[in-house]
DNA sequence: GAAATAGTGTCTATAAGACAGTATTTT
DNA sequence: AAAATACTGTCTTATAGACACTATTTC
């Protein structure tokens, strides 16, 4: 038995849950309930449960459900972190998933804090560099895909969507080009009736066509938002 | 003991080792030595050894060294496959790495076969879909980065490099544009003296500048090779 | 009708591609 | 000098961006 235990790998999943609050991309953190790093903010996560989880993806979805109270967000694998030294308890491996959620869908919870991704405090384990990798990936992917729509609650207007893109990319986008690209993707359909208020012309609202609910659209040559 | 064993996750690494033979992208496979899938071609791989491997990346590098006889190729994490049903022995998790190697550096071995990625036979486990994912990733990444240089043995000429890009992308590229882009990247330096033979003007040979030996260069708007 | 934001038409700038020319080698 | 491939100059085409104009709402 001791031999098995000594050889065992600590096998977990962690979730980088990102949302936009105002114009600022934020990550959801929970204080660690036990040692190591008791009380230190950490990514929602936990061990894989082989009898319960069909796969690591299902384990991540379960973590979001049980520990954050979210069902069915956009959830994709980011990468796997592993090694002898990242967890003081032993050789550990964590399959990390990235989830995107409109702020409106995030439950209010005592044990859940939102932190701007550019102002990270000290995090447990190697979670800080994991978050930084996730943010970089989301930024890169947003340049050539419809990924940011998962941060918008439907229905949304094109000016709203553009603002979301600009927040994630960290720079402004040409309005005409943006609309050309989004139009070419053909993934949005106008929603009739509902429109927005304000002392100005209201914006047309859109929702995702059903075919694109779970599929990213790829933008031809990207949005040409250049790296700073 | 039985409880520990029942809960345990089978924790392995696998490597998709790709090389270009002629114009055809090929993957290196080895027949399984034991059940399950004994004798069936599979990706080089094996269990993580916590006492020996510093991380999953190091485990993958060790697998390449021990099982294929390759040291220090380009090696990056692809993704992690996991689940209750992918290995008949139990809940398994495999961190999969992708390695690129010039054909010239691949050792000749009895137990190593090269198979064109478009003509895959039946493979062990879910290795077929893993290879397909790796090929798609390499193709996508080649559109906007210098990834294919790792398939070229240095020094190489620009026509050679272009042929490698075209093989990986599966379509032709405009010569003038290709040279403009590669030039802009500024990652190559001409090698003097050595040139190529043939009854025609020889091509200038290049090697990677040292700064770019282990770093991918990102091509501004990509190579605009469109998906078929 | 003034103010404010949404949406569009069109010109300009930039980047990609086509094509044909020159360059350099062997036979 | 013929053949073959390397390399380059330049025109054309396609795409992105700037800018100003029209549209629609509230007050």
Image (cartoon, coloured by chain):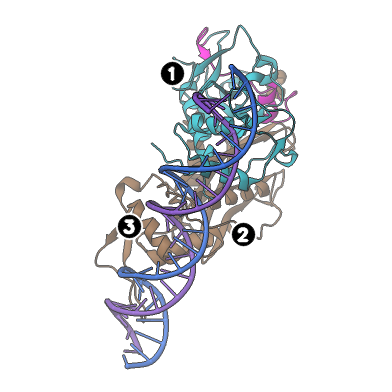
Chain colours: A brown, B cyan, C blue, D purple
Mark number for residue B76? none
Q: Quadrant of residue B190?
A: top right
Do marks 1 and 2 share a chain?
A: no
In the image, what residue occupies the spot 48% across and 59% down? A165
Mark number for residue B119? 1
Q: Give the chain letter at badge 3.
A: A
- Separation of marks 1 and 3 at Cα, in angstroms: 41 Å
Q: Report the span colored magenta.
A: B36-62
Across and down, in percent, residue B38 comes to: 52, 8
Count neighbours of disc 3 (C-alpha within 10 A) and say few if under 14, some if 14 to 19, many if 20 or more: some
In the image, what residue occupies the spot 59% across and 45% down? B218
Q: Quadrant of residue A49?
A: top right
Instruction: Describe residue A198's horizontal placement relative to residue A17 as left or right.
Output: left
Quadrant holding the N terminus of chain A: top right
Asked if one can make out residue A110 in the rendered structure from this viewpoint, the answer is no
Element type where label 2 sits in the image: loop
């Amino acid at each position: 038995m001791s031999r098995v235990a000594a050889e065992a790998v600590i096998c977990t999943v962690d979730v980088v849950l990102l949302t936009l609050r105002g114009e600022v991309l934020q990550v959801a953190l929970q204080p660690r309930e036990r040692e190591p790093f008791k009380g230190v903010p950490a990514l929602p996560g936990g061990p894989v449960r082989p009898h319960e989880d069909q796969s690591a993806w299902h384990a991540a979805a379960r973590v979001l459900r049980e520990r954050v109270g979210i069902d069915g967000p956009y959830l994709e694998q980011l990468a796997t972190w592993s090694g002898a030294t990242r967890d003081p308890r032993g050789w550990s491996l964590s399959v990390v998933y990235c989830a995107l959620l409109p702020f409106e869908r995030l439950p209010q919870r005592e044990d859940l804090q939102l932190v701007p991704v550019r102002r990270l405090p000290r995090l447990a384990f190697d979670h800080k560099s994991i978050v930084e990798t996730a943010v970089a990936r989301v930024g890169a992917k947003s340049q050539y895909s419809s990924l940011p729509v998962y941060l918008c609650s439907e229905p949304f207007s094109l000016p709203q969507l553009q603002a979301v893109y600009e927040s994630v990319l960290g720079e402004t986008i040409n309005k005409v080009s943006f609309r050309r690209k989004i139009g070419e993707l053909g993934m949005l359909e106008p929603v009739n009736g509902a429109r927005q208020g304000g002392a100005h012309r209201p914006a047309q609202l859109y929702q995702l066509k059903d075919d694109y609910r779970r599929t990213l659209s790829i933008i031809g040559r990207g949005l040409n938002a250049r790296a700073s």
